[in-house]
Image (cartoon, rainbow, N blue to C red):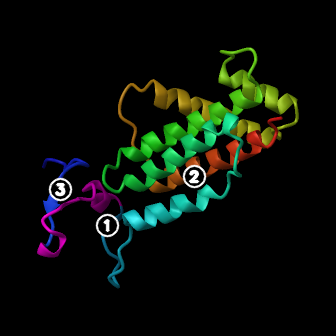
Amino acid sequence: MTRRLAYETEPADDWDHGHMHPMPDRRWADIVGRMTLDGVEMMSFARLADLAAEWEGIIPPQPAEIDGPAQLLRMARSLFAHSWFDYDFMTVACLLGFQAMEAAFRALYPEPEGRPLLKLVNQAERDAILPHNIAELARSGVELRNLYSHPRTQSVLSVGMAASMLENAHRLVALVLSAVK
């Protein structure tokens, strides 16, 4: 069975003047099914977008010189929602979340440039910006960022795994950026 790609479409009804509509990635049906027993759709683009929208308010507005992490998280939220059309976008969204985490630490500690991310996380813990348990979470994020940045094969995440990673990335970025002077 060949999987439909994100750009595959189906003809629209006459009312839509012949425009094509993107199709949901078929893997969603395998992962969550389509409908509950009472006929409610279990997952949809709107549900994914609503979930991602919940994280938007975690990051307060940032000055232009340090808005890079917030912009990366905005892209991550968009990709998370658009994973309805290409499930692989979910993993890419998480990678962007980890890159936002790195950008936040680099805004906090801009010098010396090129310092490994793990050292920045450890420095934030020593400076009491991150409590130990949050620093451990950040170190796990560093490992995941490295795995997703240098993959040996494709990674696939469940919605729960990706949502947890992205929500925690938003919370961590907000915490780190709150310490940037």
Quadrant position of the C terminus in the picture = top right
As rendered, which of 67 and 118 lies closer to the eye? 67
Residue hosting label 1? 33
| Residue at 84 percent of width and 37 percent of height | 129
Tag shown at residue 164: 2
Work out whether 113 lies above or below 134.
above
Asked if residue 158 can be seen in this view, the reply is no
Identify the residue at image location x=50%, y=65%: 50
x, y (%) of residue 20?
17, 60
Q: Earlier in the sequence, mark 3 or mark 1?
A: 3
Query: Which tag, 1 or 2, sits closer to the chain's start?
Result: 1
Instruction: Mark 2: give few (<14), some (14-19) or many (20+) Cα within 10 Å.
Output: few
**Taking the image as drawn, is residue 149 in sight?**
yes
The numbered mark at residue 106 is none
Check disc 2 and report its element: helix, strand or loop: helix
Q: With 160 as the anchor, is 110 left or right in this view?
A: right
Residue at 50% from the left image edge and 51% from the top image edge: 77
Number of numbered labels in the structure image: 3
Disc 3 target residue: 9
